[in-house]
Amino acid sequence: MDSHSRDDQKKETIEAVLENSLEIEEDLMRTYLITAERIHDDDELKDRLQNFAEGNAKRTKQLIDELSKSR
């Protein structure tokens, strides 16, 4: 096996981990957004939950996109 194939395998493994992580992040995002919608007396906490949820999923998607572009 040459180094090019090993590099491709590493990228595929990392991409698979990130895609799995994205699924988890999207589930967490839904949970955080549902929780945020139930908060009526603390606008700051509501905003923080929404931003946190959306930010994590977005960063994971960006990593997947970067890996895909480098192929």
Image (tube, helix red, strand yellow):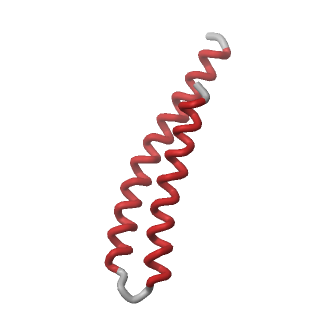
Which residue of the protein is positioned furthest toward the bottom in this rendering? 41
Camera-side residue of 32 and 69: 69
Instruction: Check the image and report above or below for 2 versus 34.
Output: above
Indicate the position of residue 40 as horizontal and vertical percent values: 35, 85
Tell me what residue is drawn at x 44 percent, y 47 percent: 22
* Corner quadrant of residue 10: top right
Which residue ends up furthest to the top in the rendered image? 1
Judged left or right of residue 30, residue 21 is: right
Q: Could you say where residue 59 lies in the image, as x and y percent from the top left?
A: 54, 51
**Residue 60: x, y in percent?**
52, 48
**Is the residue 46 above or below the residue 42 in the image?**
above
Quarter of the image with the N terminus in it: top right
The residue lying at 46 percent from left, 60 percent from top is: 54
Taking depth in this image into account, of 25 and 43 the one nearest to the observer is 43
Q: Nearer the viewer, residue 62 or 4?
A: 62
Horizontally, residue 45 falls left or right of residue 70, namely: left
Quarter holding the C terminus is: top right
